[in-house]
Amino acid sequence: MKEQSIIVYSQPGCPPCSFVKELLSSQSLSFIEKDIKKDPAARKELIEKYKAMSTPVVLIGDQVLYSSDIGKLLEVIESSKKKDTY
């Protein structure tokens, strides 16, 4: 199965952002981090395209998971691990 691209919008001093990045790393999942404090274009994209004012926001393929969707993130990770075993 082709690995889906993962993008994490984050910012310094954000405990949920750190948790999400550590979780993805612990599952050996590579991701692109977009720091909205250092990258004004990423901040603009987060607000305009995803209508989000807080982080983390995680894009996995065509799924958008907001900071309140941590449980959903775990489901997506588990689902992708199961697909990889077939």
Image (cartoon, rainbow, N blue to C red):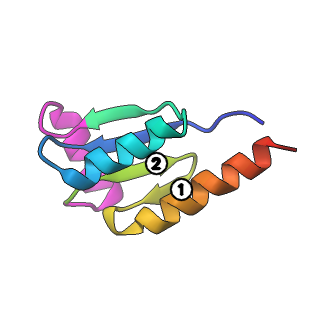
Between 21 and 44, the one lying in front of the other is 21
Estimate the x, y position of residue 69 in percent, counting from the top left. Answer: 41, 67
In this picture, which residue range is highlighted in magenta?
A: 35-53
Residue at 45 percent of width and 35 percent of height: 25
Residue at 59 percent of width and 57 percent of height: 76
Quick one: which residue is furthest to the right in this view? 86
Q: Is residue 65 left or right of residue 11?
A: right
Residue at 49 percent of width and 58 percent of height: 73
Q: How many residues crowd around disc 1 within 10 Å: few (fewer than 14), some, or many (20 or more)?
A: few
Pick the quarter of the image with the C terminus.
top right
Quadrant in which residue 18 is drawn: top left
Quadrant in which residue 3 is drawn: top right
Return the mark for residue 63. 1
Return the mark for residue 59. 2
Residue 57 is covered by the magenta coloring: no
Cβ atoms at labels 1 and 2 below 8 Å apart: yes
